[in-house]
Amino acid sequence: MADSKAFIQSTLRETSQLHAQLTPEHIAAIAKAAQLMTDAMRSGKKIIWFGNGGSATQSQHMAGEFVGRFLKPRRSLPSISLTENMASVTAIANDYSYEQLFSRQIEGLGQPGDVAVGISTSGNSPNVVAGLEQAKKMKIATVGFTGGTGGKMVGLCDACLVVPSTVTARIQEVHLTVGHILCALVEDGFLANAS
C-alpha cells in the first residue's frame, strides 16, 4: 500500500461516519432488542446467537460477555452461540445440510421466551434465515444484525439493526459496537430487577 497512513485515516473516518449515520430508527431497534433480551434474562430464559464467518466469532464473543461478565459483577447469564459445538456443527452440515445448521440446533435447544439473534452482513445467509424462521415457528423472539437493505432477515425479526453500508468490514464493526451496547443495557436491566 503506497500510503498506509492515509489508508488508516480514511478507514477510521469511514467507520466513525457510519456510526454517526445511525438514525432514531436504528436506535429504536437497538432499544427494542435490549428490552427483548432483558425480559428473557429476567424470566430465566437465554439468548441464542448465530452467524457465519466473522459473524460466527461475533456470536461467540457476545455469548461470552453474558456468560462471563461485561462491565459489572453479577451472576452468569444464560447465553449460547450455535457456532461453538463442532460436533453438532459438523454433524448437521454433513448429515442434513449447511442450511439447517442453526435451525436444527434451535429446534433442539430453543424455548419460548428465549431470544434468537441472527447475524448476517447481507441479511440473506440461508442458514441464518432458516434459523430465524425456526425461531419464529417456536415463538422465540428474534433479533437481527445485518447491513445493506437488510435482506430476507428484516421480515423475520422482531428487532433488526440494518447497518447502512454494503462494506462487510464496516458492517461488522458497527455490529460489534451495538453488541457491546446491548451487553451494557441488558446487564443494567437485569441488575436493576435483581436488587
Image (tube, rainbow, N blue to C red):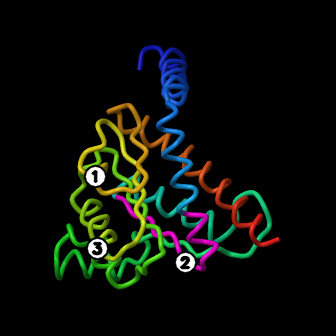
Secondary structure at numbered mark 3: helix
| Segment tinted magenta in the rendering | 37-51
- Name the amino acid type tagged 2: Lys
Q: Relative to 175, is 94 on the left or the right?
A: left
- Asked if disc 1 and disc 2 are in contact, CB closer than 8 Å, the reply is no
* Residue drawn at (31%, 43%) of the image: 150
Residue 163 got which mark? none
> Is residue 38 within the magenta segment?
yes
Which quadrant holds the N terminus?
top left
Name the residue beneath numbered marker 2: 45
Q: Earlier in the sequence, mark 1 or mark 2?
A: 2
> What is the x, y in percent for residue 79?
54, 72
Name the residue beneath numbered marker 1: 155
Looking at the rendering, which quadrant does residue 195 occupy? bottom right
- Name the amino acid type tagged 3: Lys
> Is residue 31 within the magenta segment?
no
Q: Earlier in the sequence, mark 2 or mark 3?
A: 2
> What is the x, y in percent for residue 73?
80, 67
Distance between the alpha carbons at the discs numbered 1 and 2: 24 Å
Name the residue beneath numbered marker 3: 137
Q: Badge 3 local density, few (<14 within 10 Å), some, or many (20+)?
A: few
Q: Is residue 180 above or below residue 16?
A: below
* Residue drawn at (24%, 65%) of the image: 130
Q: Is residue 165 above or below residue 193?
A: above
- Name the amino acid type tagged 1: Gly
